[in-house]
Image (cartoon, rainbow, N blue to C red):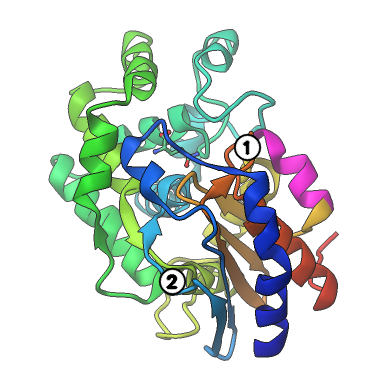
Amino acid sequence: MQEILEQIVTACRPYCSTGKVASYIPELSKADPFALGLALAGMDGKVYSAGDSDHPFTMQSIAKVVSLCLALMELGPELVFSKIGLESVADPFNSIFCLEKEGAFKPHNPFINSGSIVLASLLPFPDGDSKFEAILEMARSMTGNSTLNLNYDVFYSEKFTSDRNRSLAYFLKSTDSIEGDVEETLDIYFKQCSIEATAIDLAVMGATLAGNGRNPVTGEEVFPPEIAKIVRALMVTCGTYDGSGEFAVKVGLPAKSGVGGGIMATLPRRMGVAAYGPALDFRGNSAAGTKALEMLSEEADLRLF
Ligand code: GLN
C-alpha cells in the first residue's frame, strides 16, 4: 500500500498546475500550489502515507463534518434537520441566491456555508467559546490527535475579509434562521474552518466515519452508528458541493473537501483516506487531490458505486 500511495503522489503532482490556491482568504494564498499528500487509515488502526501528508493546513469546510457530528449528538437528527435541509444544491458553497430561492429560507444542507453557520448558532452550549471548544474536542476525537488546534493567522484573515459569509449570516438572522449574536456565530464558524490538521489526521477522521463512529487508532467510540450513516450519506450527495455528482462518478467514495486543499473520504467498514493539495479546481475542490483519490480508488478497487 505504501508503494501505491507513493506512486500516485508522483503521478498526480503535475495535476497541481491545473488548479489555483484559494486567495479570497488572504492567508490561504501562502500555500505551496505544488504540495500534494495522500494518507490512508485502516480499520486495524494502521496508517500509510506519502508526499506532504504531514503538512498542516486548515480544515476549512471539512470542519462542517465535525460540527454536524457534534450537533447530531447534542440535538438529534429531528431538530437539526428541521432547521437545515438534506438536499444537494447546484450552486456554489457560499451562494446567497440559493438561500433566498428556497422560500422557507432554510439552508439546503449542512455542508454549505449557510448550513454550517446555522449549526454553529444551534449548538447547545452557553457561549461562543464553549461551542468552539466542543467542536475542537470532537475534531480531536475523530482524528485521534489531541494536539489539534486553531491557526490564528487564518482565523483573523478570514474574520476580517469575509464579507460574503457575513452577508449570509445577517441574511439568516433576518429570516430568524439563526438566533443570538451574529458576529459571535461567525467567529465560531471561522474558528472551526481554521482548525489545523494534516492528511494523516483526516484519514483517521475518515476511518472513524468508516468504523461507524469508532476511531480505529484510539479505540474511542466517538459517536453512534446512526450518526455515521447520516453523515456518510450527506458526504456523497453534498460533500464536494456542486461537484458532488462528478466526484461520486470519478472517485466513488463519500467525501468532504475544504478550500485549504484537503479532501477527507471514507469507505464504510474498511478505511479512511485523505488528500492534501491546495491548488483548487473552479469549484473549490483540490485538483490534484481529487485526481489522486480517483487513482487510488481505481488501483485499490475502493469504489462504492
Ligand atoms: N472558510 C471557507 C469559507 O467560508 C470554507 C469554504 C470551503 O472550504 N469550501 O469560505
Q: Which residue is mark 2?
A: 201
Q: Nearer the viewer, residue 225 or 263?
A: 263
Figure quarter occupied by ligand 1 = top left
Q: Could you tell me how far apart the alpha carbons at marks 1 and 2 are, in whole angstroms?
A: 22 Å
Q: Looking at the picture, how far across and down is residue 166, in whole percent?
A: 31, 20
User: Is residue 303 something one can see in this rendering?
Assistant: yes
Q: Disc 2 marks which amino acid?
A: Asp
Q: Looking at the picture, how far across and down is residue 151, in whole percent?
A: 24, 54
Q: Is residue 87 left or right of residue 160?
A: right
Q: Which residue is mark 1?
A: 241
Vertical placement of 129 versus 181: above or below?
A: below
Q: Looking at the picture, how far across and down is residue 218, in whole percent?
A: 40, 85
Q: Residues within 10 Å of mark 1 (few under 14, many from 20)?
A: many
Q: Main secondary structure of the magenta part?
A: helix
| The image quarter in which residue 271 lies | bottom right
Q: State which region is magenta.
A: 241-249
User: Residue at point 68% right, 46% down?
Assistant: 18
On whether residue 245 falls in the magenta region, the answer is yes
